[in-house]
Image (spheres, grey):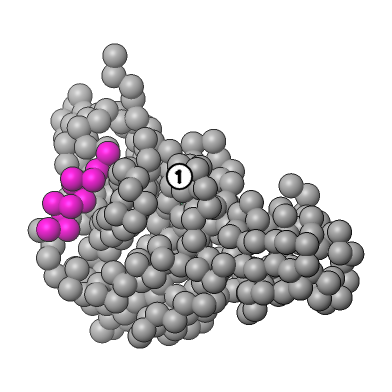
């Protein structure tokens, strides 16, 4: 899609962020676009947003607009465009949520780029936790997301180690957990990207829209995830249960994999994942253990 088209969509979306209903003529006056242009941009936007358009007006379903959410106890910041929500979140205190419609420099794990096109759900939650609580987050976040997605949308999501959320090996969501250490606490930035109504750019990715055959209002998903994080200390108290839930949803367990690691390429069968998130592999030369930060890529080896 041309850069100009993205810009046109962002200009119109900017008006809808604060007011869900507009006359087409009004939008034409505000933006300086012709009425036909406004209509064609809105028509395109309605492929990725719950936007209804008739001949004279447009309504963006408030259930799809994060600006309408007021999660109790949290500060929600909804932006149209940012570099990365991970960076924006650092400017607000803990217990904030930064959501953005579009990220120009969305980040994935290992410094990879995360493509964040219109219609996805891209957000960062910032939390204040002690070190033992923070250490469990890499397994707690994928557990929470799989539970919420499975229950709410009746899809069967699984976890691909360390924390990709997949449906039949297609990536539905990614998680990036980063932390700042202070003498008495950690401020943790939990970045979550869910392919909801966007068109994922990578072939191996899937979106809820494609899985379910229609657009999904994003606020229920966001509100439910935030609800879990309102209770996060309680969730993190039960380490055993978390590990059990993580292992139950782990697609990678007992699979033969090839890992691209800091030590080179390693092949073996996954026999365990420790509560700190490290993977244990049975290789020809014995057991090896790798932390998520020392593995760049996980590939499944199809057994014959
Ligand atoms: C991965 O699978 O590599 C992690 C992807 C995490 C993407 C999310 S989108 C919201 C937040 N902001 C970012 O820049 N990245 C995370």
Q: Main secondary structure of the magenta part?
A: helix
Is residue 246 inside the magenta stretch?
A: yes
Percent x, y of residue 1: 74, 47
Q: Up-down: is 133 above or below 146?
A: below
Q: Is mark 1 within 8 Å of ligand 1?
A: no
Percent x, y of residue 110: 45, 51
> Few, some or many C-alpha atoms within 10 Å of disc 1 (few <14, some 14-19, many ≥20)?
few
Residue on which disc 1 sits: 212
**Quarter in which the C terminus is drawn:** top left
The residue lying furthest to the left in this view is: 240
Name the residue: 18% across, 52% down. Answer: 245
Percent x, y of residue 210: 51, 42
Q: Up-down: is 201 above or below 181?
A: above
Name the residue: 42% across, 52% down. Answer: 174
Is residue 229 visible to us here?
yes
Pick the residue in front: 290 or 234: 234
Is residue 207 visible to us here?
no
Is residue 154 inside the magenta stretch?
A: no
Classify mark 1: helix, strand or loop: helix
Pick the residue in front: 221 or 145: 221
Percent x, y of residue 297: 41, 40
Name the residue: 36% across, 84% down. Answer: 72
In the rendered structure, the answer to whether residue 138 lies left or right of residue 103 reads: left
Identify the magenta region: 241-251
Q: Up-down: is 230 above or below 204?
A: below
């Amino acid at each position: 899609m041309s850069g100009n088209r993205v810009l046109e969509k962002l200009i119109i979306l900017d008006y809808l962020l604060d007011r869900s209903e507009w006359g087409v003529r009004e939008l034409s006056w505000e933006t300086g676009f012709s009425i036909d242009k406004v209509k064609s941009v809105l028509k395109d936007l309605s492929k990725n947003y719950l936007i209804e358009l008739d001949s004279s007006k447009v309504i963006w379903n408030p259930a799809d607009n994060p600006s309408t959410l007021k999660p109790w106890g949290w500060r929600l910041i909804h932006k149209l465009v940012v570099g990365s929500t991970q960076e924006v979140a650092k400017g607000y205190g803990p217990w904030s949520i930064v959501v953005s419609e579009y990220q120009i420099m969305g980040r994935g794990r290992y410094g990879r780029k995360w493509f964040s096109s219109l219609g996805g759900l891209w957000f960062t939650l910032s939390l204040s936790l002690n070190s033992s609580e923070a250490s469990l987050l890499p397994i707690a976040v994928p557990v929470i997301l799989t539970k919420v997605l499975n229950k709410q949308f009746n899809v069967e999501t699984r976890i691909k180690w360390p924390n990709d959320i997949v449906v039949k090996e297609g990536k539905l969501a990614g998680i990036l957990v980063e932390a700042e250490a202070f003498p008495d606490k950690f401020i943790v930035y939990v970045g979550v990207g869910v392919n909801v109504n966007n068109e994922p750019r990578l072939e191996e990715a899937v979106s809820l829209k494609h899985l379910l055959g229609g657009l999904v209002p994003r606020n229920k998903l966001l509100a439910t995830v935030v609800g879990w994080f309102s209770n996060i200390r309680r969730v993190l108290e039960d380490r055993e249960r978390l590990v059990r839930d993580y292992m139950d949803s782990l697609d990678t367990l007992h699979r033969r994999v090839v890992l691209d690691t800091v030590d080179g390429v390693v092949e073996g069968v996954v026999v365990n994942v420790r509560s700190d998130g490290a993977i244990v592999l049975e290789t020809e030369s014995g057991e090896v253990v790798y932390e998520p930060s020392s593995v760049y890529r996980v590939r499944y080896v199809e057994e014959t």
